[in-house]
Image (spheres, helix red, strand yellow):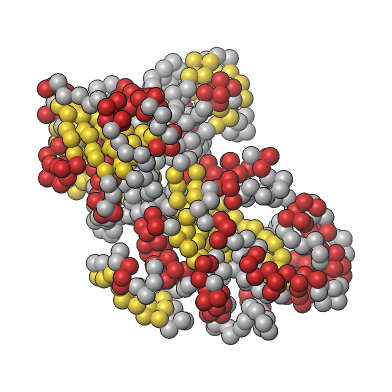
Amino acid sequence: MSQLQVKVASIQDVSAGVRHFTLVDAHGGELPAFSGGSHIVVTMPAPGRTYRNAYSLLSSPEDRAHYEIAVHRQPQSRGGSIYMHEEVKVGSVLDISYPVNLFALSRVAKHHLLIAGGIGITPFMAQIHDLERLGGDYSLHYGFRSREHAAFADALKGRVSQRAVCYDESLGQRMDFDALLRAQPLGTHVYACGPQGMVEALVSTARALGWPEHHIHSEQFLAPPVGEPFTLKLSKSELEITVQGDMSMLEALEAAGVDAPSLCRGGACGRCELEVLGTDGELQHHDHYLSDADKASGRKIMPCVSRAKCGYLELNL
Amino acid sequence: MSLAFKQETFRDDYTFRNSPEAIRRFPFPFPEDQYMYSVNIEPHTPGPKGAVTEFTLDVDEHYVAECRDKAITLEQDPGRCASLPHMMDAEWDFLEFTMESLARDYPEQFSLSKNGKAWTWVNRPLGLEQSFVFGDVATLPMGPFEYMGRQVQGDFVLLDQREDTLFADAGIVTSQADWSLAFNVGMSWHEWHGPVPQVTKLGVMDRALKFLMSLQQANPVRRLNWTMTINPRLDTSPENYPLWGGDRNKVTEQNAGELAHLRVELQTLFRMPRSNAIVFSIRCYLISMQEMATYPRWAKRFHRVLRDLHPDLVEYKGITKYQQAVVAWLSRFDDGADIGTGTQPE
């Protein structure tokens, strides 16, 4: 995969635990344009291991002079977000992927209903630029725990206050998904990004109300869960690799120098799918990509977020 | 290869010919004696110097003549260029992509200068100079997709990605091998791939779609496809069937070397940045059997491929009427010797 090299131009703390990074091309040129909802994968060369995390771009897609990302320090981080908070300074040079969009706006929607929870506001910050430029009809509902967690509420107030509604949970303000979804005109697409519980509640409410599946969009990047170590047997390359408890299968493959395709690294895109040939235990699927039937078959696994509770897992790789 | 643009025609008197250099760089698609439909997608990385894959978009000696033929087809049938209203961002992506590629790879022929959104484009082979404002349709003589679609060889389809599939929502298609943009615009991936025999049951199209849905900026892909055409005719559309369909009855063992052409499509796919659309480029290369036979290894190979082609594919590719005549013409080059694998000429 082609990579871009960027330099950190500035860092700001925008709310409790959220650090905002401005990135410019390390060679002084223009960065590629992108579409609202895109993310980049940042490579973090920590001592002993490499982290790769996906972050949504929140700057204007038309602005090729810089990119902006916001990183929420995860309390139970495996290390990536802590690395971004503690090791990355102004002037640091980072390798990033080209922008990838797995959370694109529909270009045929009549109305766009954007639902953000906490740090989930970031992809919408860029999408709003696209919607404003295209004259798209939209409304944004942004919920946060308290004012000090409202990373971009002030920025939104200045830009699009008449289309944005904020909900401060510490004041008892909560989104009523059922009422909100019932009030939308036909042809509306709904987009949700935020904590897992919020996204799942929104999606199930929309389905229960009979919304067409293709009008419901959501994005969640999953972090690989921690588990027990096990051994990967690779049938084609005849390698055996240990997956440590705090590493994903994909990270273990990469650390061993195996060329394993991947893209989003968060269980969403499907690019890293591998064929399972056998195991002496059970697969632990965590991705959003495989169907229930795929998961039940025991023949497929997404190594970016899934793992196994077993002694060995044999892959067709 | 030198870019001396030829004066030639792809209709009426059919004066199209390949120079020896153009034959040498022809994208011959058969590495083995047997052919079976496959997706055969590979990264669109720069090929060797002089190859059709050396640059992002290939410009060759037929550039001026092909653009002229495209203009004739569009004049006769403006519907060969179509774009649904939600594709305007993708149209601008396409304009930027083609202008930047051509100016970077062929600086003696094309140039692009930018001052903010005020851009100036110069196309020397076609004698065009255009100043315009990027993003403002009113400053171009026509829509951005058609404007640049007329200035690049081959056909282009812009694919919108939504509803877990790809929709062919814009296209400029003037050199199609018996398919129709008017018929396909707005269709989804599985709709327009519906008719390919021997393929649907293999799940090939599902896998290819999944692969393309995660296509990334800066990592374009390509594949070769092929069919045959009688006379060097670019426009073999269903709409104009009366103009070319009958030629298929004229092929004999004597004239097949001159009349029958292998038609190879270099298909490339690029992810666009602003619209998240995919540009599907279908660049057509034609070579007569006589020209191919200047490299007997190719003539031998194609003789075997055509002779043993699965009957369903003979039918699908529309070559039933003249397959035997062409096989007979090519047989004189085939001594039956093993020629190994690979697409290279001698």
Quick check: A102 left or right of B223?
left
> B19 or B160: which is nearer to us?
B160
The residue lying toward the viewer, choosing from B338 and B290, is B290
Residue B213 appears left or right of A108:
right
Q: Position of residue B7 (x, y in %)?
A: 58, 85
Residue B186 percent location from the top left of the image = 50, 53
Q: Residue at x 24, y 22 (%)?
A: A75
In what quadrant of the picture does the C terminus of chain A appear? top right
Viewed as shown, does residue B76 lie left or right of A62?
right
Q: Which residue does the image show at 67% across and 66% down from the upper left? A: B263
Residue B296 vertical position relative to residue A11 in the rendered view, above or below: below
Q: How many circles with numbers are drawn on the protein?
A: 0
Residue in front for this viewpoint, A239 or B193? B193
Q: Residue at x 76, y 56 (%)?
A: B315
Is any atom of residue B23 visible in this view? no
Q: Return the residue nearer the eye: B319 or A6.
A: B319
Q: In x, y percent, where is residue B299? A: 78, 67
* Location of residue B207 with respect to A5 vertically, above or below: above
Q: Quadrant of residue A30?
A: bottom left
Seen at 72% across and 45% down, the residue is B198
Instruction: Specify the quadrant of the image occupied by residue A104.
Output: top left
When the figure is inspected, residue B245 is found, relative to residue B45, above or below; the finding is below
Identify the image quadrant of residue A200: top left
Residue A64 makes an appearance in the image: yes
**Residue A252 picture location, percent across and down:** 45, 29
